[in-house]
Amino acid sequence: MKYDLKKLDQAQVSLTFTVTPADYKKDVENAAVKLSERAAIKGFRPGKAPYNIVKQQLGELKIMQEAVDAIIQKTYYEAIKAEKLETVGAPQVSIEKLAPGNDFVYKATVALMPEVKLADISKIKVEPKVVTVGEEDIKKVLEDLQKMQPKETATSDAATKNHKVVVDMNMSIDKVLVEGGQAKNHQVYLNEAHYIPGFADQLIGLKKDDTKEFTLPFPKEHYQKHLAGKNVDISVKVNDIFTLEYQDIDDVFAKSVGQDSVAKLKELIKTNVTREAENKEDQRQEVVILDQMIEKTTFGELPQVLVDSEKRKMFQELQYDLDRRGITVEKYLQDLKKTEEQIFKDFTEQATKRAKAALISRQVALDNKITVSKEDMDHELAMIKMSYPGDQTVEENLKRPEIIDTIAATLQNKKVIALLKEKIVGKKK
């Protein structure tokens, strides 16, 4: 393997790699094994088909494509180590030549660490807030628990705040049906806030089989931007109405949720609510500290690749959040009437801030000799594996250098934040 290193503007370098077939032979063989584990190779158990058979059935190019990531990871990290480059962020990789039996050529562009002059920590001020949990906080949690176990009885009475109403619903704007705005047997608890403010109030007084049409404004922060803040016409048909009876909050109720008595239940709730409030206060302090550190720290020129790396992370986080809500990226972009490129541009300010925060964390770690020990890593890796028992994909990912680096950076950042809080707030965690 050989490479050519070239310095670029904006504190970047590019490395163009030429990897010979002899250099990547083992990676290709490993890739063939992985492919044969996923593909059904007639006459062979998964992962046991010889290379030539896999090549014959799946094609040499497919094997080569499977091996690309492993080749890049190995050669890139070898070069970075050999050149003693202080890089930051993930490299931008472009493949320039990929043909079985020939030299594999790719280019990696990576940012070099810019100069960072940390803010004077003695001038960073954070005023801690006292965390208090009162009876009203405990009562609210008890009521929420109570509402999770209602006894429901169908009724012919008109709906009140104490009822659950089941409706068929249609939404439209200017007589055009809203995509995704139709729902059958939509359940509405009239004593709880609905995602469309005012919707529950419109159902009060209705009886089974009643219909009603009304108009309500969608919240301005609604994720479907073409609906946010707009007046939406809604028609409903009431299918059922249920009376809700809640269990008294007594020792019997406490036992139904795993506690011996109401007193024990309240004690547990107070502990949990206090811990949650303390965690929120910790997070608030961390945000304030980082905001002030970023404002008062002097940075050299930030490489664009570093900011772009944070943009990609933000987009991945967005994808994960949309997946959890059952929304596709395509649908999200369609609703926003934006492209991925426009979304990335919108990320610029926040991505720059995140990049600066990462640089500060690294510099604080260097100045204070904060490191991540083998014991720290072993413990963290063990915890991750415990969360995904038997997941081979996770097992393989935890062997990848960039994944290990990310985990180590996360652990180091936690130590940095703890040190800053100790020095600025006076709280040792």
Image: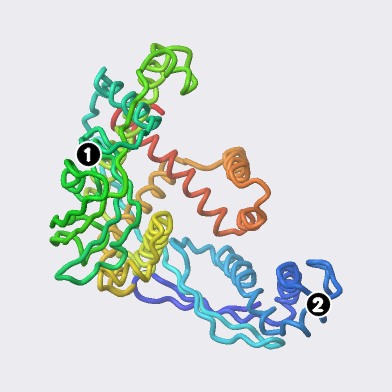
Q: How many marks?
A: 2
Residue 66 lies, in percent from the top left, at 65, 74
Taking depth in this image into account, of 105 and 330 the one nearest to the observer is 330
Q: CA distance from mark 2 to mark 1?
A: 70 Å
- Residue closest to the eye, 381 or 293: 381
Q: In the image, what residue type sits under mark 1?
A: Ala
Q: Secondary structure at mark 1?
A: loop
The residue depicted at 58 percent of the width and 65 percent of the height is 77
Numbered badge on residue 51: 2
Q: Quadrant of residue 68?
A: bottom right
> Dividing the picture into quarters, in which one does residue 62 lie?
bottom right
Residue appearing at x 47%, y 41% in the figure: 369
Q: Position of residue 423 (x, y in %)?
A: 33, 31
Regarding residue 113, the answer to whether it shows in the image is no
Disc assigned to residue 159: 1
Mark 2 / mark 1, whichever is N-terminal: 2
Residue farthest along the right direction in this orientation:
43
In what quadrant of the picture does the N terminus appear? bottom right
Q: Position of residue 145 (x, y in %)?
A: 37, 28
Q: Is residue 180 above or below residue 409?
A: below
Q: Residues within 10 Å of mark 1 (few under 14, many from 20)?
A: many
Residue 200 showing in the rendered view: yes
The answer to whether residue 129 is above or below residue 44 is above
Image quadrant for the C terminus?
A: top left
Q: Nearer the viewer, residue 326 or 26?
A: 326
| Horizontal side of residue 37 vs 94, given as left or right | right
Horizontal arrangement in the rendering, residue 219 relative to residue 355 (left or right): left
